[in-house]
Amino acid sequence: MHAACIDERTGVSFVLTGGQRNDAVAFETVWEGAPVLPAPVAVVMDKAYDSNAIRRFLAVREIEAVIPSKANRTEPIPHDARKYGSREKVERFFNKLKQFRRIATRYEKLGRTFLAFVHIVSAWIGLR
């Protein structure tokens, strides 16, 4: 599951993909699913999203990409480690999602049903 979060209580876009699928492939779908908000100044992502295409996508929109380089990148691209520390907010959000047994164990067989429960639980987390 891929998510765009504003903070540890507010998930704004969710996309479900197969476990063997590359994370970077889902970036544009997650981005398009996020509501139109004031443009972010920086976007913090895991190193799985380290790709030239994503960096170009953000650069065109004048958004700072805070993404650590993958180990196989020949010339590592530096990132702001202080800003990258805020990625733990997304991890906290996922932890809160997994506190709900139905999400943690994925009882649902269909992806759309599972994603519906993710949206319901996300709304619950936001209202708490």
Image: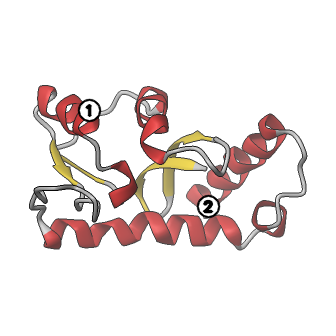
Secondary structure of the residue carrying numbered label 1: helix
Side of 125 where 25 appears, left or right: left
Q: Quarter holding the C terminus?
A: bottom right
Percent of width and height locating residue 44: 28, 55
Residue 13 in the figure: left or right of residue 111: left
Q: Does 87 sit above or below residue 29?
A: below
Q: Position of residue 9 (x, y in %)?
A: 50, 61
Q: In this view, does 4 lie above or below 86?
A: above
Look at 34% across and 66% down and name the residue there.
87
- Mark nearer the viewer, 2 or 1: 1
Report the side of 31 relative to 64 (left or right): right
Q: Residue 125 carries which label?
A: 2
Q: Name the residue under label 1.
A: 53
2 and 1 marks in contact (CB < 8 Å): no
Circle 1 Cα neighbour tier, 10 Å, few/some/many (<14 / 14–19 / ≥20): few
Category of crowding for the residue at label 2, using alpha-carbon neighbours closer than 10 angstroms: few (below 14), some (14–19), many (at least 20): some
Identity of the residue drawn at 26% across and 32% down? 53
